[in-house]
Image (cartoon, helix red, strand yellow):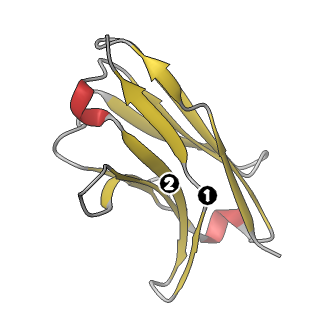
């Protein structure tokens, strides 16, 4: 059974930082492209950052220079370090695992709220 379990969301003031974690089980972690997506109320889900098994990363333009995605293959975990957070970063953040664009798994989501 595949499980993606996110943690680390919460309430933070503008300019603050949070680190999201996603622990994966039931997959061969190193073969998957891991990613973080987010969905704000009334908006479509959007890609935030992805990291391939080769370590190549991609970021949405809106988060470049502020967010960093990384993995710990020994722990089957993907992280999203979020710095200089803005109110527009508020959303439910979802962990994603994708294999050859045909097998996709999602976590349950974790809420991030950026507000003073």
Say which label, 2 or 1, has the lower sequence index: 2
Residue 74: horizontal and vertical position, in percent?
78, 46
Quarter location, residue 8: top right
From the top left corner, tell me how far across and down residue 35 is, in percent.
47, 57
Q: Classify the position of the C terminus by image quarter.
A: top left
* Residue at image location 29% in from the left, 11% down from the top: 15
Residue at (61, 58) in percent of width and height: 108
Is residue 44 left or right of 1 when viewed as pictured? Answer: left
Residue 47 location (% of width, % of height): 32, 58
Marks 2 and 1, how far apart in space? 7 Å
Q: Residue furthest front?
A: 42
Extreme-bottom residue of the structure: 102
Task: State the quadrant of the N terminus.
Answer: bottom right
For label 1, count other residues whose C-alpha is less than 10 Å away and answer few (under 14), some (14-19) or many (20+).
Answer: some
Q: Does the residue at mark 2 contact the one at mark 1 (Cβ under 8 Å)?
A: yes
Name the foreground residue: 49 vs 88. 88
Q: Position of residue 50 (x, y in %)?
A: 41, 55
Q: Report if residue 103 is visible in the image.
A: yes
Q: Which mark is residue 66?
A: none
Q: Residues within 10 Å of mark 2 (few under 14, many from 20)?
A: many
| Residue at which label 1 appears | 108
Q: Does residue 65 appear in the picture of this structure?
A: no
Residue visible at 62% across and 39% down in the picture = 21
For numbered disc 1, what is the local secondary structure?
A: loop
Looking at the rendered structure, the number of numbered marks drawn on it comes to 2
Q: Residue furthest left?
A: 61
The local secondary structure at tag 2 comes to strand
Left or right: where 1 falls relative to 6: right
Quadrant of the image occupied by residue 107 = bottom right
Residue bearing mark 2: 94
């Amino acid at each position: 059974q595949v499980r993606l379990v996110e943690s680390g969301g919460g309430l933070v003031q503008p300019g603050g930082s949070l680190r999201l974690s996603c622990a994966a089980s039931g997959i061969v972690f190193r073969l998957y492209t891991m990613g973080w997506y987010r969905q704000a109320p009334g908006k479509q889900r959007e890609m935030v950052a992805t990291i391939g098994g080769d370590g190549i990363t991609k970021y949405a333009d809106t988060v470049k220079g502020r967010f960093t995605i990384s993995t710990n293959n020994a722990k089957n975990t993907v992280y999203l370090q979020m710095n200089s957070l803005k109110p527009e970063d508020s959303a439910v953040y979802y962990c994603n695992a994708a294999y050859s664009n045909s097998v996709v798994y999602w976590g349950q989501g974790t809420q991030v709220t950026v507000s003073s």
